[in-house]
Image: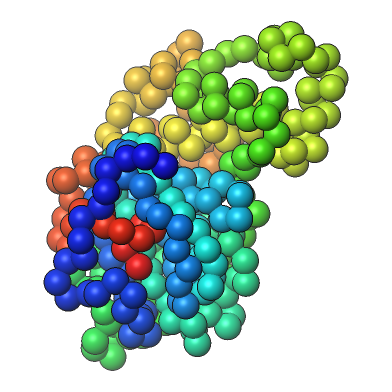
Amino acid sequence: MAGQTPDPPPEGRIDGDEPRPLSFRTEVYRGGTAFPRKIQPWGELLYALSGVCEIEVEGRRFLSPPSYGIWIPPGTAHEAWSREDMLYVTTYVSAELCESLPRSVRTLALSPLLKAVLADFAGRGITVPQTAPDRRLARVLVDQIALAPQFDSYLPFTADRLLAGIVDSLSADPGNRLSLAEWARRTGVTERTLSRRWQSAFGISFNEWRLRLKLVRALSLLDAGEKVQSVARSLGYGDASAFIAMFRRMTGASPTTLPQSAARKPGEAGPQITRGRAGCPGGG
């Protein structure tokens, strides 16, 4: 992906350093930043505080929106990019601690406890746990990764050229209200054919996929501090109540009750925030 070239590594960590046995980094990445393909001998948990990261593994694309982490096991080739500014947390886990963790790339629903531990480390500027209490907290985090609900991909993508064109259009404009029947006419197939092809490629229906896309975009906008009414309009909802109903149905919570502590613009974040650099999110 073309884009900005991340800065060289800051002092205190050399690219390729082994975690000891866990380490953490919170960084700002500007929109358009690309992270070249890389293989590492340790695991990574990637988690967006704001923005959305796109990660590609063996031709499959994974989205990392707020509230969902991406687990990358040791020895997995991956590359990534950000289309928008994002504030990102990376946890590096040494290979010996990965035995109980997923053996393939997985989307994880992050627990409040896991996010609280990461927030505590970031707030205190802890990149490598040194004290006995901090080491115990770090091991709790490893346990939480193992216990987290796993998904093959929250928002699946496909290499199918016909479907990829629709995906690109919807990704560029999540408020697009064209129905499946209208997309079928535009692509020259029947609605039934397009529906079957979509279900086969994604494992979910067209409407479900579009709802997930809207949720992903909504989470990013809300974490950036956008008002609920503004988010609703950008996603094609005529009024905020319809958007709130969708959000509550998808998450079990209302967007009006989301905590605002993470609603920060990149570059205005707390301690230990640095700019991105070569490698995938977190710099490892």
Quarter of the image where one finds residue 284: bottom left
Image coords of residue 86 (percent x, y): 31, 45
* Side (left or right) of 15 relative to 48: left
Residue 22 lies left or right of residue 237; in this view the side is left
| Quadrant of the rendered image containing residue 118 | bottom left
Q: Position of residue 11 (x, y in %)?
A: 14, 72
**Residue 208: horizontal and vertical position, in percent?**
67, 32
Query: Which residue is nearer to you in this view: 111 or 44?
Result: 44
Above or below, 8 against 228 in this view is: below
Q: Which colour scheme is used?
A: rainbow
Q: Nearer the viewer, residue 27 or 11?
A: 11
On screen, residue 132 versus residue 71, left or right, reads left
Q: Is residue 127 visible?
A: yes
Residue at 80% in and 30% down: 197
In this view, which residue lies farthest toward the bottom? 132
| Residue drawn at point x = 42 percent, y = 38 percent | 219
User: As displayed, is residue 262 above or below residue 235?
Assistant: below
- In the image, residue 8 above or below residue 96: above
Residue for point 40% across, 55% down: 36
